[in-house]
Image (spheres, helix red, strand yellow):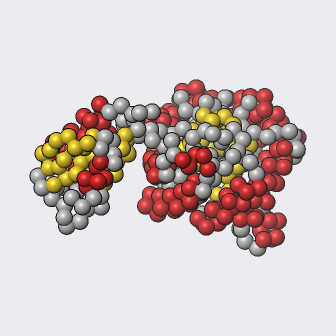
């Protein structure tokens, strides 16, 4: 476990189904389905693909009555905890809670009269499920925009605490907070502010980050910066792509900071003119073969004598390539030479045999 965990911001610990959020729990990875929720078969299939990709929690929009009618069967058909995403309509929240969702994403102040707020919060408390208050710079209240002139960290914080106030007024404290923005600097500032002033668990994300290339970069910078500072308890990478891709990127962000190690980690060099093997082809083939192996293994595939041997010695399984092949290292020890055409299968076989110390 990374030393980073000892520096993490101390928060309350909540549970979304069987997944702990906050406290000393590992940072979890979430995603959101992109099907019509009323299409039950398609939504279940997408959730199951997210499970395979390693999602800890999956959020599903419940935006109308057909979606609310579908959510019970979806919850019962999958293994991962399901979060209902609700806006404005308290009836949809009540139906989702009754259907067995593990958390509700809702802003209490957006669902009408206080009687409605209390009804939803009482139902959540009875079922023992938390709510997530999700503030977005693109949907701030008009009075806050008038006060601050444009979205600021202070405006996001004030909006979040306003909705927290609606919940705590009725004695509801099982709250997770998100203060997202498409602006990376703004979301960083907003999360830093709320982390300084509260002990609620935080759900990190850069909202509407974009297509895979740009969205991955923005999410890695924004989410990664905060995680490196010990801020954040669960994350969602928002991409204009399949939800499985969001999970993959999210898990890579965690792995880069030593916060997740349930999959094979492959470290490879960018290549240069010193390379004597087809390293790109080899690395892609290894990545494909080990992608579904849920095991903490550090694999290095380096292409030359400059950094190769040193990096290979620092890995669980390492290849330091040379002309026509490479040297295989296991736990820092040089084992044998391997022909280029045998590198992929050799690494795969060693990964299968490897026994993590944890």
Image-quadrant location for residue 69: top right
Q: Is residue 42 left or right of residue 344?
A: right
Q: Residue at x 82, y 34 (%)?
A: 122
Residue 279 percent location from the top left of the image: 22, 55
Quadrant the C terminus occupies: top left
Q: Residue at x 72, y 60 (%)?
A: 193
Answer yes or no: is residue 116 visible: no
Compared with residue 245, is residue 263 higher up or lower down, i.e. above or below?
A: above
Residue found at the very far top of the displayed protein: 76
Number of numbered discs on residues? 0
Answer yes or no: is residue 313 visible: yes
Q: Is residue 327 left or right of residue 251?
A: left
Image-quadrant location for residue 299: top left
Q: Residue at x 57, y 40 (%)?
A: 26
Residue 215 percent location from the top left of the image: 49, 60
Q: Nearer the viewer, residue 313 or 244?
A: 313
Q: Nearer the viewer, residue 114 or 63?
A: 114
Q: Residue at x 51, y 41 (%)?
A: 1
Compared with residue 187, is residue 8 higher up or lower down, i.e. above or below?
A: above
Residue 4 percent location from the top left of the image: 56, 49
Residue 173 percent location from the top left of the image: 79, 40
Q: Nearer the viewer, residue 325 or 244?
A: 325
């Amino acid at each position: 476990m990374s030393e980073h965990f000892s520096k993490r911001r101390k928060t309350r610990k909540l549970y979304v189904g069987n997944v702990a959020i906050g406290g000393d729990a590992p940072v979890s990875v979430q995603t959101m389905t992109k099907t019509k929720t009323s299409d039950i078969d398609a939504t279940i299939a997408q959730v199951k693909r997210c499970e395979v990709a390693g999602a800890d929690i999956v959020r599903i929009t419940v935006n109308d009555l057909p979606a609310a009618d579908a959510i019970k069967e979806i919850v019962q058909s999958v293994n991962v905890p399901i979060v209902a995403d609700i806006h404005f309509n308290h009836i949809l929240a009540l139906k989702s809670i009754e259907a067995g969702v593990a958390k509700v994403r809702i802003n209490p102040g957006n669902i009408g009269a206080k009687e409605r707020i209390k009804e939803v919060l009482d139902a959540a408390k009875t079922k023992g499920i938390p709510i997530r208050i999700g503030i977005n710079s693109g949907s701030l209240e008009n009075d806050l925009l008038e006060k601050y002139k444009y979205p600021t960290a202070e405006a996001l914080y004030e909006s979040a605490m306003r909705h927290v106030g609606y919940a705590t007024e009725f004695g509801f404290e099982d709250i997770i907070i998100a203060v997202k923005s498409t602006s990376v600097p703004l979301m960083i500032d907003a999360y830093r502010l709320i982390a300084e002033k509260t002990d609620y668990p935080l759900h990190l994300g850069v909202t509407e980050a974009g297509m895979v290339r740009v969205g991955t970069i923005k999410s890695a910078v924004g989410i990664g910066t905060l995680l490196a500072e010990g801020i954040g308890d669960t994350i969602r990478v928002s991409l204009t792509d399949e939800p499985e891709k969001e999970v993959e990127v999210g898990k890579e962000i965690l792995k880069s900071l030593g916060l997740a190690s349930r999959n094979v980690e492959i470290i490879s060099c960018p290549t240069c003119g010193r390379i004597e093997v087809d390293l790109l082809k080899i690395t892609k083939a290894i990545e494909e073969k080990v992608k579904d192996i849920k095991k903490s293994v550090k694999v290095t595939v380096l292409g030359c004598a400059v950094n190769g041997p040193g990096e290979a010695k620092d890995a669980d399984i390492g290849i330091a390539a040379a002309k026509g092949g490479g040297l295989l290292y296991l736990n820092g020890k040089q084992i044998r030479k391997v022909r280029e055409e045998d590198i992929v299968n050799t690494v795969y076989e060693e990964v299968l045999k490897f026994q993590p110390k944890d």
